[in-house]
Image (cartoon, rainbow, N blue to C red):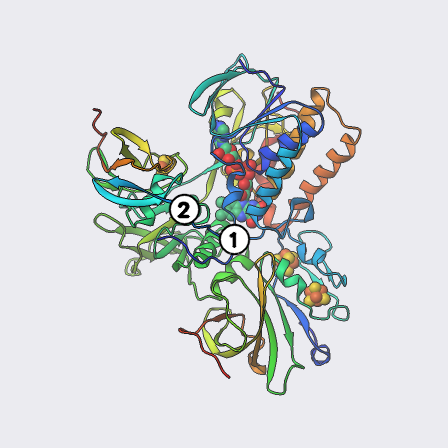
Amino acid sequence: MPSQERFAKGPIALFECMQQIPCNPCVDACSRGAITVKEINDCPSLNEELCNGCGVCMTHCPGLSIFVVDYTYGKDVALLKIPYEFSPLPEAKDVVDALNRHGERVGSAQVIRVQTSPNKTNIIWLSVPRELAMEVRSIRLQKGGHHES
Amino acid sequence: MRIVNHPILTFPQQDMVTFTLNGQKIEGVAGEPIAAALHAADIKVLRHSHERHRPRGLFCAIGNCSSCLMTVDGIPNIRVCIEPLRAGMVVETQEGKGKII
Amino acid sequence: MITTEILVIGAGPAGLMAAIHAAEAGARVLLVERADRLGGQLIKQTHKFFGSKAEFAGERGMDIAEKLINWSSDVSGITIWKNAVVLGIYPDGVVTISHEGAFCTARPKKIIIATGASEKTMAFPNNDLPGIYGAGAVQTLMNVHGVLPAKRILMIGAGNIGVIVAYQLLQAGVEVAGIVEAAPQVGGYRVHAAKLQRHGVPIYTSHSIQLAHGDSCLEGVTISKLDEKWQPIAGSEQYIAVDGLCLAVGLSPLTELLWQAGCEMKFAGELGGYVPLRDANMKTTHENIYVAGDVSGVEEASAAMVEGKLAGLYVASVLGHKKDSFTKEFQTAKSQLAALRSGPASVKICTGLSKVVLEEVG
Ligand SMILES: Cc1cc2nc3c(=O)[nH]c(=O)nc-3n(C[C@H](O)[C@H](O)[C@H](O)COP(=O)(O)OP(=O)(O)OC[C@H]3O[C@@H](n4cnc5c(N)ncnc54)[C@H](O)[C@@H]3O)c2cc1C
Ligand code: SF4
Ligand code: SF4
Ligand code: FES
């Protein structure tokens, strides 16, 4: 987990890939060379100074286990980028249920941007309450859609 | 039911053809396995077993297990999971070993 | 009688790579596939694969299939037959094939068997009710034909296949009631399981299915908790209403042809059942028969591709088609395979392999 000082500097990738499995596409995805997987079965390690939180690695990760958080986004809110492979996609400005790692609703989030990707792992940018940034890992669209204008 | 929106796959609209199941008219995509067309119409019972007349449906979908035998155009024991659908086919739920006419 | 130098049986990732590499080295190859399309298991895999770049990691299984299929059609020297089932391999080296419904025979110099694996099933009362499917059938229906198998499904088995297919069901719009796993922990990769859990899919570890309910079709199942000895705990029964049940309880190598040809077989539970003894070049105890992929031990597409490449390169070289780069390519492939198998996730595979890979066969 990056330090408070690093979080204060801006967006950074979070890796929830804690089991040794034969995998390394995240390494090739990062043009800044911020990710290292020494032997293919090792877990990835991140050079926090090189990572700028661009999120490119997120679309390539087969485990969908990389997230990006930016605590500098707002005073009470953080920006959270999550990978999303469901249809339909939410739209910018939608308010959605924010789910934790167990699929439980822990609050709501606002969609800031939907970044579609040619490989269909899309990235959803969410504004979430700061204290929920380390909890929220997925979303559920609210029935009938919900726009906040 | 057919999948309309899928996050990864696209299923292009295809031409539908008509066939019958036990006399009832059903639509399916030409060339898809008969079993897929039946499932799309929510029909899961394909035959009744020989000895205990138990209902049977699709199990492997690749022609391995013989769970899906039906009578097609009068010929019994057709594995409908791999038999392509054609317009006008006469498909019947098979009872036991099927009748050879 | 058809003549060819190398007959490759099965066009999954292993068979495709074997055919491509043998033909690139200059051999004439006949590749036969019983299905009406090439790609084996890969065409049903909508998720991105693990592995490294050399095995196309990070790409979706179905896209890897397309790459391999295009590659195989670009290489001259490969004849491809679809709807062609190999029925038998006889001691005199004659192979019988049913191609587009017509019977024919072939006498190849060498054979590479890459027939993959078939799904195991499971015994419980009413396991024959319509609505109960093997995981492969569910994938074929929804990912190949675009038809939903059910509205609400319970998955049995939390190995990689179970967790991956459950995720694919969610993506197709099916409600997943949960995953039932007899072991006390999830067997599949944790990142795959996490994808489901964050959408609220419960995983019932130390649970098993007791029976299925329904008159003409499945209507529900009873599951119960298991004690440390894997016995159901009385009173822990729980009814779950579902119209679909998906069994992902393992694969076993599709070895009929190997038995028939008289290859020496050995039981290795870690690899899914009986597999052929072979050497590091994928040669069985039969002089002219080689294997690659899941038929030689249920593993992963990444390993299947590399094994196919090894077998293809080696068999071509035995027949006198040796590329200048042979030694380098062959060694690279071997180290690639060793790297894939070096982690804790492969301990079981390696135990199995240690029983069946010999210094020298025959
Ligand atoms: C749900 C699921 C998810 C998976 N996820 C991954 C993953 O993320 N990463 C990964 O690396 N692997 C994954 N795998 C495993 C991978 O798909 C298999 O290991 C791989 O396909 C094995 O390749 P193969 O060529 O040996 O066999 P197959 O792909 O099974 O191909 C064998 C082919 O042989 C044909 N055949 C069989 N018998 C005959 C005959 N008598 N005559 C002619 N043809 C015949 C079959 O029709 C088939 O096309 C997954 C598998 C499943 C089921
Ligand atoms: S977020 Fe961007 S910079 Fe950071 S590791 Fe991923 S690809 Fe590299
Ligand atoms: S690509 Fe994803 S799953 Fe693979 S090693 Fe990197 S973070 Fe882990
Ligand atoms: S469902 Fe198994 S043969 Fe058709």
* C200 with respect to C339 (left or right): left
Residue at 52% from the left image edge and 40% from the top image edge: C270
* C311 with respect to B89 (left or right): right
Amino acid type assigned to the residue bearing label 1 in the image? Gly
Q: Position of residue C245 (x, y in %)?
A: 35, 51
**Which quadrant of the picture is home to ligand 2?**
bottom right
Residue under numbered circle 2: C141
User: What chain letter is assigned to the residue under label 1?
Assistant: C
Residue at 51% from the left image edge and 51% from the top image edge: C160
The one of C291 and B24 positioned closer to us in this rendering: B24
First of labels 1, 2 by sequence position: 2
Q: Position of residue A101 (x, y in %)?
A: 51, 69
Q: Quadrant of residue A127?
A: bottom right
Amino acid type assigned to the residue bearing label 2 in the image? Leu
The reply to whether dot 1 and dot 2 touch (C-beta < 8 Å) is: no
User: What chain letter is assigned to the residue under label 2?
Assistant: C
The label shown at residue C188 is 1
**Is A115 above or below relative to C157?**
below
Q: Position of residue C47 (x, y in %)?
A: 54, 53
